[in-house]
Image: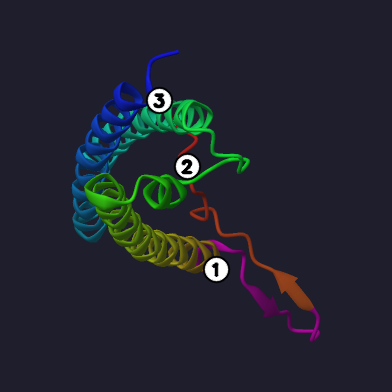
Amino acid sequence: MADANTLYTDLVQNIEQMIKVYRHLLDVMRREKQILIDADLNELNENNQNKEKVLIKLRGLDARRLQLVSDIAKAVEIKKEDPRLLDLAIHYGGDRGDKLRNLHSVLVLLLKRIQEYNVQNEQLIKSALDNVTGTLKNLKDTLMEKSTYEKKGKLKEQKNPNAQFVSKEA
């Protein structure tokens, strides 16, 4: 295991890299919002692929961060199970502690903004799905067989030969 100073430096670099990737994810989420507003399916598919790549990268960075925090906790003999960045900041104090607190604050802010965009994008998607569902229902109602009354007063089902979603001709 590396010494505590090397681990600290590795952790700071890891978190700074995470911040860069989270900023990129925030840009992707902003773009997704505009794509949803524009209803551009091709762009949406491309953006989703990009978002998936960013999320995979973040999972790797986060796994590395967790390992570094665990290694630092062992090296400096922090007895707390699953220590957090703020726990390390308290332990280090001074400039090192301030640096960890600042990095933590930036991560929290970025995550909050990403969550806000995620909620907004989810609302846009739900609205679009509601519109599509309503349109399909209206189309189905328009194409359904209409009931009429016969001369004897009984209901007669009228078959509408044009009431097909798909043409039988190929």
**Of the residues shown, which amino acid type is indicated by label 2?**
Val
What residue is disc 2 on? Answer: 166
* Residue depicted at 31% across the width and 49% down the height: 97
Label 2 environment density (alpha carbons within 10 Å; few <14, some 14–19, many ≥20): few
Q: Which mark is residue 128?
A: none
Cα distance, mark 3 to mark 1? 50 Å
Check the image and report above or below for 30 versus 63. Answer: below
120 left or right of 74? left
Farthest bottom residue in view: 153
The quarter in which the N terminus is drawn is top left
Q: Provide the major secondary structure of the magenta segment.
A: loop
Q: Quadrant of residue 17?
A: top left
Q: Earlier in the sequence, mark 1 or mark 2?
A: 1
Circle 1 residue: 141
Give the foreground label among 3 and 2: 3
The magenta region covers: 142-154
Task: Compare marks 3 and 2 and give the one earlier in the sequence.
Answer: 3
Q: Is residue 120 visible?
A: yes
Q: Nearer the viewer, residue 63 or 87?
A: 87
Q: Position of residue 127 (x, y in %)?
A: 40, 67
Against 55, residue 67 (above or below) is above
Q: Work out whether residue 32 can be spotted.
A: no
Mark 3 or mark 1: which comes first in sequence? 3
| Residue corresponding to mark 3 | 60
Residue furthest out toward the top: 1
Image x and y of residue 144, in percent: 59, 64
Helix, strand or loop at disc 1? helix
Q: Residue at x 35, y 25 (%)?
A: 7
Q: What distance separates the C-alpha of mark 1 from that of mark 2?
A: 15 Å
